[in-house]
Image: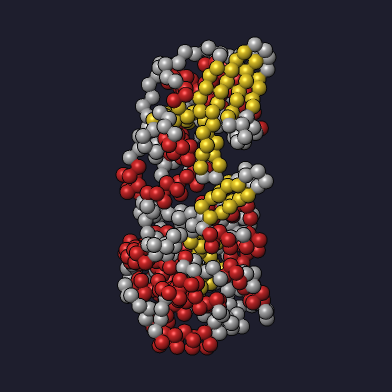
């Protein structure tokens, strides 16, 4: 007898429906065809143990499992549940009142028949709804994640016996329903960290506001304990709230990577990722034998924070250059290619020198001649070229730390950022792929960032006196355009240019001299 149902294979952040067919006929042995990997082939042992636990049997006949289409590689252990149900139906051990072919079924079985959570549930649920399936049967721990998708019956089961009884009509399981819009609205601004908790550092908070308003990348240079990490963690709280589309896209990536955790639902706040400097190239950018999203894709629509930037491997930093420009990661292999989105803001921090106290107002630097420059040279020019704001962070004084003056909260700053982003949305409305000032190509900078003769004179003087490099020119214009947007002015004024010039510390030829 033939039994048939459907599962899914995840590639990149999308899913492909897989047809699972099983026949039980005269003969011996268990055969699995359709390009399964080792984890899929091992399902025979898990399925057999699970069936025996609940009093069923694995047929001692010829059992053929076909996973179609056969040219797509099937990976992982999440085909256990559909294979188990089809074996029971094909061997006529159960009589079903609900049709297996109306559902997408996924789940990993333990030896006692309990179901373990799986990865990539959200893209599978989206594809199942798109293809018109009635429902999605999956482990109960994954059900809240799948319930983000409406117009699809999400049936969470704890064991294979629950699934059997559901399809036999002996047990009714109410489909899990989530009001996605209400959940999204209630949690989209639920950040733990707030700028209201930061005492002092008003100049750094201003730089963060400019970065958020224009989508600019930032590098902070300062001694240990100056507050670089604390300020970086608060940046997502002043970025514009995620749209529902962005939230779904972000949740899909975390689902594929298995980072959502059990009982997780929609990610409604902007992600903040802070990998350790020992991270490998593949872990940062994505890849591996079974390609997974890297840290830059997990920070999609959010912030990637690289603490102690010069300590990262040079190769790991260099592979970020293309994703910073293209806002996506393409991983190619001999027979296939996958693409992960990577539209993130890069926030980096570093000490000014190995000992950490170069240019410190109180402590003396103990680094020898040329050591500071060699330390800075660990960051390549092309990578530095993609960072618009260089901000010097100085330690907060005791008086500032102990002052009880109220500090401006993230909500107030975010309102200004949103107004500036609305101006940019209107400005770039007809431009494909450009959403903020930071994304402007050089040719557009000349058209959008027009400055007066007085402003031009100021910029020329600054570049000559401060020894700014050529790469600083476009960056200063982009940042000054963002400052003008925050001020709500149509034209870039001299004070906007002057403020932008001070955010180019590392471009000064004598900075480490």
Render colour scheme:
secondary structure
Seen from the viewer's position, the closer of residues 311 and 424 is: 424
At 58% from the left and 61% from the top, the residue drawn is 322
At 40% from the left and 28% from the top, the residue drawn is 134
Give the quadrant of residue 38.
Answer: top right
Give the quadrant of residue 398.
Answer: bottom left
Q: Is residue 336 above or below residue 358?
A: above
Q: Is residue 485 visible?
A: yes
Instruction: Tell me residue 423's x, y (percent).
Output: 34, 66
Seen from the viewer's position, the closer of residues 441 and 360 is: 441
Instruction: Tell me residue 356's x, y (percent).
Output: 59, 72
Horizontally, residue 207 falls left or right of residue 286, namely left
Horizontally, residue 283 falls left or right of residue 143, namely right
At 46% from the left and 56% from the top, the residue drawn is 302
Instruction: Tell me residue 35's x, y (percent).
Output: 64, 32
Q: Is residue 201 visible?
A: no
Q: Is residue 108 above or below residue 433?
A: above
Indicate the quadrant containing the C terminus: top left, top right, bottom left or bottom right.
Answer: bottom right
């Amino acid at each position: 007898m033939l039994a048939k149902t459907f599962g899914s294979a995840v590639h990149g952040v999308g899913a492909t429906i897989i047809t699972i067919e099983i026949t039980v006929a005269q003969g011996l042995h268990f055969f699995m065809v359709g390009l399964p990997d080792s984890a899929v082939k091992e399902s025979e042992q898990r399925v057999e143990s699970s069936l025996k636990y609940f009093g069923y049997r694995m047929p001692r006949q010829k059992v053929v499992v076909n996973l179609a289409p056969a040219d797509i590689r099937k990976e992982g252990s999440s085909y256990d549940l559909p294979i188990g149900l089809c074996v029971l139906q094909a061997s006529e051990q159960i009589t079903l009142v609900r049709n297996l072919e109306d559902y997408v079924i996924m789940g990993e079985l333990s030896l006692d028949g309990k179901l373990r959570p799986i990865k990539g549930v959200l893209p599978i649920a989206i594809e199942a709804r798109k293809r018109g399936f009635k429902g999605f049967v999956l482990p109960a721990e994954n059900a809240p994640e799948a319930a983000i998708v409406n117009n699809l019956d999400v049936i969470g089961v704890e064991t294979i016996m629950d699934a059997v009884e559901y399809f036999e009509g002996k047990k009714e399981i109410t489909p899990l329903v989530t009001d996605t819009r209400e959940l999204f609205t209630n949690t989209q601004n639920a950040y733990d960290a707030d700028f209201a908790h930061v005492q002092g550092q008003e100049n750094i908070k201003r730089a963060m506001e400019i970065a958020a308003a224009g989508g600019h990348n930032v590098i902070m240079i300062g001694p240990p304990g100056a507050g670089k990490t604390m300020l970086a963690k608060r940046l997502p709280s002043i970025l514009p709230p995620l749209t529902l589309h962005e939230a779904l896209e972000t949740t899909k990536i975390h689902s594929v990577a298995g980072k959502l955790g059990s009982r997780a639902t929609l990610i409604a706040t902007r992600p903040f990722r802070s990998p350790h400097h020992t991270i490998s190239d593949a872990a940062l950018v994505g890849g591996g034998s079974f390609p997974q999203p890297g840290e830059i894709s997990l920070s999609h629509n959010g912030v990637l924070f690289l603490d102690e930037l010069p300590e990262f491997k040079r190769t790991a930093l260099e592979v970020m250059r293309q994703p910073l420009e293209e806002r996506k990661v393409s991983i190619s292999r001999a027979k296939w290619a996958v693409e992960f989105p990577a539209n993130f803001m890069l926030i980096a921090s570093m000490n000014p020198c190995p000992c950490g106290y170069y240019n410190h107002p109180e402590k003396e630097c103990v680094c020898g001649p040329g050591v500071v420059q060699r330390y800075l040279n660990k960051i390549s020019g092309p990578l530095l070229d993609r960072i618009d704001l260089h901000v010097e962070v100085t330690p907060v004084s005791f008086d500032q730390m102990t002052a009880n003056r109220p500090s401006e909260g993230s909500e107030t700053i975010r309102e200004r950022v949103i107004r500036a982003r609305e101006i940019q949305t209107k400005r770039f409305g007809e431009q494909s792929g450009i959403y903020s000032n930071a994304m402007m190509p050089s040719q557009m900078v000349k058209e959008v960032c027009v400055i007066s003769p007085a402003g031009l004179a100021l910029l020329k003087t600054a570049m000559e006196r401060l020894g700014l490099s050529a790469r600083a020119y476009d960056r200063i214009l982009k940042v000054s355009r963002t400052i003008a947007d925050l001020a709500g002015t149509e034209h870039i004024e001299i004070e906007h240019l002057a403020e932008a010039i001070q955010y180019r510390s590392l471009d000064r030829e004598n900075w480490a001299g």
